[in-house]
């Protein structure tokens, strides 16, 4: 039999792979003659990392060596900054890497073959259903309320004997509102102690609501709480993929077992450490972006837009069936925004010129 006549074996992935939603990353804006293109589709920090951070990256020469797999220097620096034991911190490739560790350790299938259940708000971060179902667990998506906030009562009502993990995203990506401390404490009081609650605080530095939850203050009192944070947003280190979780030792010991070795490079660790050493400068830049967010929000409201409160580095326009139409209007003006089906459009806070152009497009659209 010739090589051409040999049968090719059919390779099939696990059945779940065909059922997974596809993650749609934000795309750069298409060029338009006479206009500078801006990408407002990925919630990226438009500002480059601090000069001190760039210097630390440039001076790192040990690329031929594996990094410290438990990121000791970074965890110690984070421990000082957050006021927590370094052993309560587990690093990962962004906050998403931390979430994958959590789900790998605490959700999947029971010994009887039944899938564990993971509850989260929807719409929320679009990687949640992908990460949950990849582990073999089942997604239980509870619709957000009309104002874009988590339906905490609905999430409590969704708990079953199969529930293993609940994810709270605050501020919620892409709708924008944050959870208050009272809301989260009240929620935790109603969740059975054997269920892990994940507080995803990727955008915490942008929050200005004085009543907003601070997971670091809560995790000490709740043994079933894990807090996720990242250097991708406020610190402008999205490309280096460095994030972390904070939880009590009985949780962290399991997370370290399933963590991908060397997931956080020495480049990323050094950059994050130097960024923390210059945290006042980082937060000053964040404040500039918050002021830009306030300007955009005020401009939209003046135009008559009705949308959820924004506590992240983005705004959400609940456009429904007109979402794709708005995205196309922005594309014609060399702006990329993130349209979510027939639900709404998320627009990141970017450069001043980009934000002003977005306001102009929104004015024409409304």
Image (cartoon, rainbow, N blue to C red):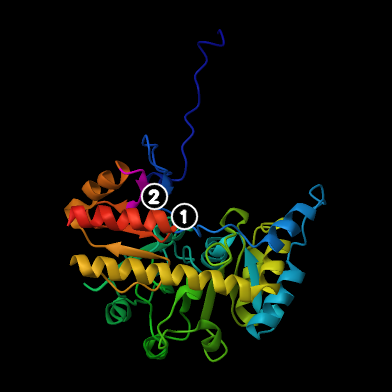
156 on left or right of 1: left
Residue 159, how many percent across, how many down? 34, 77
Which label is found at residue 249? none
Residue at mark 2:
20
Measured Cα–Cα span from mark 1 to mark 2: 8 Å
Which label is found at residue 134? 1
336 on left or right of 3: left
Residue placed at 46% from the left, 37% from the top?
Answer: 12
Residue 123, how many percent across, how many down? 31, 63
Magenta stretch bounds: 333-338
Judge whether 134 appears above or below 220 on screen: above
Residue 314, how many percent across, how many down? 38, 64
Mark 1 crowd level (few <14, some 14–19, many ≥20, 10 Å Cα): some
In which quadrant is the C terminus drawn?
A: bottom left
Foreground of the two, 325 or 258: 325
Look at the image and say whether residue 353 sits in the magenta stretch. Answer: no
280 on left or right of 141: right
Q: Classify mark 1: helix, strand or loop.
A: helix
Task: Kindly give the residue lying farthest to the front in the view shown.
Answer: 34
């Amino acid at each position: 039999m010739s090589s051409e006549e040999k049968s090719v074996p059919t390779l099939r992935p696990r059945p779940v792979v065909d059922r997974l939603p596809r993650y749609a990353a934000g795309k750069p804006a298409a060029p338009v003659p006479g206009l500078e293109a801006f990408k407002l589709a990925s919630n990226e920090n438009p500002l480059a990392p601090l000069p001190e951070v760039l210097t630390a990256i440039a001076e790192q020469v040990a690329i031929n060596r594996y990094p410290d797999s438990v990121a000791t220097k970074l965890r110690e620096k984070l421990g000082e900054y957050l006021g927590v034991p370094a052993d309560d911190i587990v690093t990962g490739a962004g906050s998403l890497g931390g979430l994958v560790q959590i789900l790998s350790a605490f959700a999947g299938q029971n010994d009887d073959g039944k899938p564990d259940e993971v509850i989260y708000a929807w719409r929320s971060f679009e990687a949640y259903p992908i990460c949950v179902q990849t582990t073999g667990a089942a997604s239980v998506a509870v619709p957000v309320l009309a104002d874009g906030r988590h339906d905490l009562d609905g999430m409590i009502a969704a708990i079953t004997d199969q529930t293993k993990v609940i994810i709270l995203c605050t501020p919620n990506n892409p709708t924008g509102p944050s959870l208050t401390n009272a809301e989260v404490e009240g929620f935790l009081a109603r969740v059975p102690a054997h269920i892990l609650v994940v507080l995803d605080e990727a955008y915490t530095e942008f929050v200005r609501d004085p009543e907003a939850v601070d997971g670091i203050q809560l995790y000490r009192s709740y043994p079933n709480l894990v807090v996720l944070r990242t250097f991708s947003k406020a610190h402008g280190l999205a490309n280096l993929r460095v994030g972390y979780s904070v939880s009590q030792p009985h949780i962290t010991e399991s997370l370290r077992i399933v963590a991908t070795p060397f997931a956080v490079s020495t480049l990323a660790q050094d950059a994050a450490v130097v960024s923390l050493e210059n945290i006042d400068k980082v937060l000053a830049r964040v404040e500039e972006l918050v002021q830009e967010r306030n300007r955009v929000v005020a401009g939209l409201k003046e135009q008559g837009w009705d949308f959820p409160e924004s506590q992240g580095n983005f705004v959400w326009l609940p456009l429904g069936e007109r979402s794709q139409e708005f995205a196309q209007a922005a594309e014609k003006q060399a702006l990329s925004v993130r349209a979510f089906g027939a639900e709404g459009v998320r627009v990141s806070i970017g450069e001043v010129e980009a934000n002003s152009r977005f306001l102009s497009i929104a004015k024409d659209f409304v």
